Amino acid sequence: MTTVLKTTGYTTPTLLALVSRCRREVTKESLTSLNDDPINNVLVDAINDAVSDIYFKSRWNWRKQSWNILWVDSQTDYALPADFDQLATEIVVNNVALKEISPEEWWRNTYAPSWNSNSSISGQPSIYTVDRALLKIWPLPSTDFVAQTPISVAYYYRQPSSMLTLASDSSNSPDVPADFTEALVRFAVARLKIFLQWTDFAIDQKRFEEIVTNRLQTDMLTAHPTRVRPRNWRTANFG
């Protein structure tokens, strides 16, 4: 189970609405559907690229989710949420922070004398790693531990949903908060101007960066300090 911690009060425009607005600005055309033509393809690709760029500029508050870990007796592997990108905080069980290690350290220690991740030792988990699509913990949860602590809550940053396509048309919107709408438009308009060989695309590129920087500053003012895992341990792939 995952829970969105941050939401916006209004809705991001649909892909059709965004593409139509970009075309009105540049080519003075308006759309009622997304047909397969070069300009529409450029704009859809640009909007997807803008979403990716925005997501990975920061650990945005609106990317933070909660996840209920349902402990199972003697089970070491737990599937991560489908939209998992990276942990937002260390995992805490019964008010004790577990020690996080890298996947390399996990497998290197499998046969170390200090502890053995393949052993049948059970109790309250104290060590974990995130390896590909799995949370791996040790020691194995014991029967008593599961009975006393059936669920622990973890927090993570989500990755964007699948990229939009022309087939998405008016039914789907880019997976960012609505207050990034203008940033999406500016990024896509700049890309379209480059495609059309217009020379003033840098104005829109600059405006995109200004909007995102402004949103980042606002987001940082409302953020709570957290201990996070290194970004080079990320597991996500956009799209």
Image: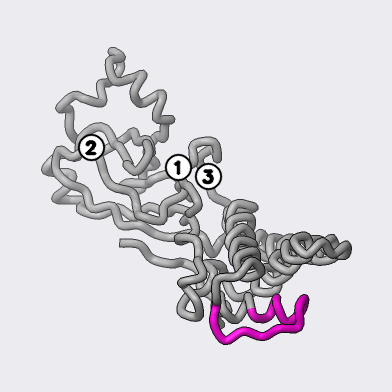
Q: Are marks 3 and 1 in contact (CB under 8 Å)?
A: no
**Coordinates of residue 128 in the picture (x, y in percent):** 35, 36
**Coordinates of residue 143 in the picture (x, y in percent):** 11, 42
The front one of 44 and 121 is: 44
**Residue type at numbered disc 1:** Thr
- Name the outermost residue toward the left: 143
**Coordinates of residue 39 in the picture (x, y in percent):** 66, 69
Q: At numbered mark 1, what does the secondary structure look like: helix, strand or loop?
A: loop
Which residue is tagged 1? 235
Q: Earlier in the sequence, mark 3 or mark 1?
A: 3
Residue at image point 37% right, 46% down: 92
Which residue is tagged 2? 76
Residue 227: numbered disc: 3
**Residue type at numbered disc 3:** Arg
Q: Residues within 10 Å of mark 1 (few under 14, many from 20)?
A: some
Region of the chain picked out in magenta, as a range: 20-34
Image vertical order of residue 169 relative to residue 221, above or below: below
- Name the outermost residue toward the top: 113
Disc 3 to disc 1, C-alpha distance: 18 Å
Disc 2 to disc 3, C-alpha distance: 24 Å
